[in-house]
Image (spheres, grey):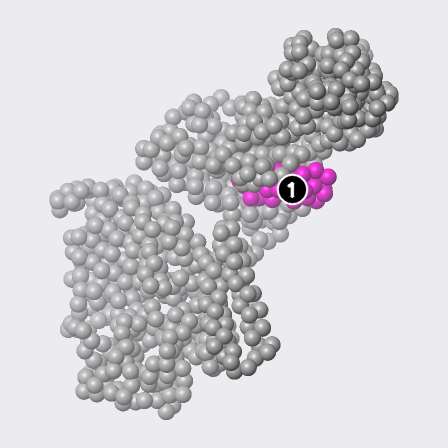
Amino acid sequence: MAGKRAAKRDGEQMVGDAAVRLPPDCRLGALSALHAELVAALPGGAVELDGSQVERVDTAALQLLVLLCRELDRRGGTLAWRGSSAALDEAAGLLGVAKILELPAAGPA
Amino acid sequence: MATVDLSQFHKTFFEESLEGLDAMEAALLALDSGSADHELVHTIFRAAHSIKGGAATFGFADVAAFTHVAESLLEEVRSGRRAVDAGLTDLLLRSVDCLRAMLARTARGQPVADAASEALRIELTQLVAGEAAPAPAAAQAGATAVDGWDIRFVGLPHLLRSGHEPLRLFRELQQLGRLEVLRAFVGDAVAADFSTLDPGECHLGWELRLHGAVARPDLDAVFEWLDGDCELAIAPLAAVEPVAPSPEPAVAAPAAAREASAAGHADGGSIRVGIDKVDALIDMMGELVITQSMLNDIGANFDLSQLERLREGLAQLERNTRELQDSVMRIRMLPIGTVFNRFPRLVRDLERKLGKQVKLELHGEHTELDKTVLEKIGDPMVHLVRNAIDHGLELPRQRRAAGKPEAGTLRLDAHHEGGNIVVRISDDGAGLNHERIRAKAVERGLVPPDQPLGDDEIAALIFEPGFSTAAQATDLSGRGVGMDVVRRNVRDLGGSVGVKSVAGQGSVFTIALPLTLAIIDGLVTAVGGERYIVPLISIVESLRLPADAVRRTAGGGEVFRFRDEYLPVIRLHRAFGCADAVTEIGRGIVVVVEDGGQRVGLLVDELVGQQQAVIKSLEKHYRQVQGVSGATIVSDGSVALIVDVGGVVRLGRCSGKAA
Amino acid sequence: MAKILAVDDSASMRGMVAFTLRGAGHEVTEAENGQLALDAAGAGAFDLVLADVNMPVMDGIAMVRALRARPEYQGVPILMLTTESHTEKKMEGKAAGATGWLVKPFDPDQLLATVKRVLG
C-alpha cells in the first residue's frame, strides 16, 4: 500500500518512499489519521515528511514523530524532510526534539 | 485593579442570589419536614456556593465572608460529616434571612455587615468543626534565592488528554528565566510497536534547567495544575544566601467594587424571561411582517375586486395583533409559585409560635400572572394566611374536641378563571362567627341594627375599615393592619377579594386578579353622549328592568330585586353628571356589578360592545377621580372613562346607608 | 483569538466571564449547565472550556468526563471555576480530565491572565 501511495507522488523519490504531508493543524485531533498514514508509509523503510504546511502543532504530534524516528531506527529505515515550517521548527526546538527529528533548524530554546 | 467594570452584572447577581435563597429556604423547609433527599442538600449547598462565588467576584466581601462560613457548614452536611437536625435547620433559615437583608443593604449601597449578621456569622463559625482562623498562605519559610533549578518532568500517559501542553509549560518557564532543555526522552512504558501505539498517550520526559533567580513559588505555580499528571522533581542549582521573605501586604478585599455598587441602585426593575417566550414573540413578529407585506401588496394596486382579500388581510392583521399582544403580555408573566414559596416558612414559624399544627397544601404554583401584580399580591396573601392560622385554625385540642384531625389544613391554590387569576386561601378551621361579626359591625355603626343581612354580606363586613374579630389580640393580629388593608391592596391591583365561611367547617378567601394591569376586557356603555367602560371581571349580568321593578327606599335610594336580594341602583349619569342621558330606568339598561361580594346595579343608556381597553392613568394625565380608575381610547377614537367598580359600589352602599 | 465555551449556571458569573473574554477579543459561547455545554461543544470546535463545578442538570465534573470522551476534545484545555474551599473537588475535576482551575473569586485580570496562560 505504501508503494501505491508513493507511485502517485513525484518520481524524484525512490519507489517505495512515502512523502507524508503534515496537516496545517497538526494537533491531537488530527493524529489518528496521521498515525495511520505513517504506519502505512513505514514498510517502505524511508519516510519522507512534508511539514511545510504546519501552522499549529502540539506535543502529541511531535511525540508521534519522535516515536516514528525510534521505529525507523529500529527497522534501519530513514527519515527525510521535504520541508518544514517556522511553527514546527519552533515547537520542536522548545521541546528539545529538533535534533532527534533531524529538523533543519534546531535553534536553542 | 480590575480593568473591566463589573457593576453591570450586580443586578443580575442580586436577582439570582435572591432566587437562590428562595430555593435554599424551600429546600431547608423540605429537609425540616423530614425529607432525607440528598438532592435537597445539594440544592442548598449549590445556592450558598453560587452566592459566595458571585459575592466575592463582585467585591461584596461581607456577603462572601458570611456565605463562606455557611458553605463550610453545608459542606460538612453534604459530605455526611454533620447530621441535619432542627437546630441546624433553624440556624440555616436564619442565615437565609440574614443574607436577604445583607443583599438588600448591598444593593442599596449601605454598610452590609451589622451586629446581627456578625453574631450569626460567629455562631456559624463556631459550629463548623475545628475551623481555625485561615492561615496566611504565604509564609514560605526561609525563601531561598538560587540561580536556577534543575527540573525533571515526565508526563504520565493521560497528561495530554487532560488538556496539558508541555509546549505551553515551557513557554511559561521561559517567562521566568532562560530555559535549557538538557534532554528529551521517551519513557519505557510506550508500546513497542509503532502501529499499535495511541498518539494521545504521553510517553515523553524532559530534563530541564531553568537559569535565573527564580523563586520556588513562581516555579511551583507553573506546575500547579499538574499534580497527578506527571512525575516532577525540582532541585535548586546552587543555593546562595537566604533572604527574608518579602513582606507582601495581604491582598485587600476588593473595596472599589463596593463603592461602585454604592452608586444608588434605583430599582428600574428587570425581568428574566424564558427564551421560549421571546421565541414566540419573534415568531409572531414574523407573521406580522408577512401580513403587512400582503396588505402592502393589495394597497399598491387596489381595486374593488380585491375587497375580499383586503378583508382577509385585515382579519389576519387583527389576529396577529391579538397574538402579539398576548405574547408581549406573557413576557411580564411569572408563576405565582414564587409567592407561594414564602408560605412554607411562614406557616412553620406560625405553627411554632401559636402551638398549632398546620398542613399546608399548595396548588397551581405554575399559574402565571403579571410581574407587578405578583409583587404586590404577596403582602395581602401573607395577611390572609396569618389570619387563617391565627384566627381560623383551632388549637389541636380544640380540633380534637370538634372531631377533626389535630393538624389543620391550609390550602392555597391559584388558577385561571376567564380572564382572571383566582387565588384561594382556604382553611378547615372554625369558620367566621357571623353573629359576632354582625354584633361588632352594629356596635361600630357599620350597619343599622335592624338591617337584614345574609351570611355572605355579614362575612364581607370584615373587610370594612377597622374591623377585627380576634377575641384577643395576639402578637400577629395586633399589628393594626386589618382586612380592610387587604381589600384595598387587592383593589389597587384591579382585583377583588371575598370570603365564604361555614361555621365549624372553615373559610375560603377568594382573590380575583386581572392577568395584567395594563389591559382590561371591558364592556363599553353609553351614558348620555359619553362612553363608560365597565370591567368585564366585575359584571354579573346586564338586564332591562321593567319600570315597576324599582322601589324607593325611605331615604330616596332606589333598589331592585335581583335573584334573592335587593340591590341599590346607581345612576351613572347622576354619579358622573352626564347630560342628555336616559333617566327612566325602564328605558335604560341595568348592569349588575360585584365587588368584594357586594353587588349594585349601574344604570346606563345602552350597551355599545365589548372591547379590550389599554388603561391610561387619569391620575398621571389629569387627577384622581372618584369612581373612575382610568381612561382609554375606544375604537372610534374618542376617550372613554373606565368605571372603578369598587368605588362605585362603595358609593352605592354609602348612599343606601345614609338613607 | 480563541473560541471559548463558558459554562456556569450563574448568569452574573457567566456574564462577567463572557464580557471579559469578549473584551479581550475572544469568541465566547455561553452555556448554563453541563448538558447545554455538551450540546454547544458538539456544534463548534472550542480552544478552551471554562466550567463551573456545581450546576444543576449536569455538573462540571460530569461534563468534563463527557467532553474528554470525545476525540476532538481530548487535548482541549478545560478549566474548572471553583472555590478554594474544595480541594477534593479540584481533584475530582482533575480525575475527570480537567486541565486546571481558576479559583473564585477572580477578577477580570486574573481571568485573562489564566486564559492567556492556557492558550499559550
Q: Is residue C67 at least partly visible in the picture?
A: yes
Residue B134, relative to residue B473: is it above or below? Answer: above
Query: How many numbered circles does the render carry?
Result: 1
Region of the chain picked out in magenta, as a range: C1-30
Left or right: B87, with A11 as reference point: left
Residue at (37, 81) in percent of width and height: B608
Residue A71, relative to residue B306: is it above or below? Answer: above
* Secondary structure beneath label 1: strand
Find residue B352 and report its horizontal and vertical position in percent: 29, 40
Q: Which residue is mark 1?
A: C28
Find residue B500 and report its horizontal and vertical position in percent: 22, 60
Q: Is residue B248 at least partly visible in the picture?
A: no
Let me know if residue B537 is in the magenta part.
no
Residue kind at label 1, given as amino acid type: Val
Front-most of residues B355 and B603: B603
Front-most of residues B234 and C51: C51
For mark 1, name the chain. Answer: C
Let me know if residue C24 is in the magenta part.
yes
Residue at (75, 8) in percent of width and height: A75
Image quarter in which the N terminus of chain B is found: top right
Q: Quadrant of residue B83?
A: top left
Q: Residue furthest bottom?
A: B580
Image quarter in which the C terminus of chain B is found: bottom left
Residue at (67, 34) in percent of width and height: C47
Find residue B524 and report its horizontal and vertical position in percent: 38, 78
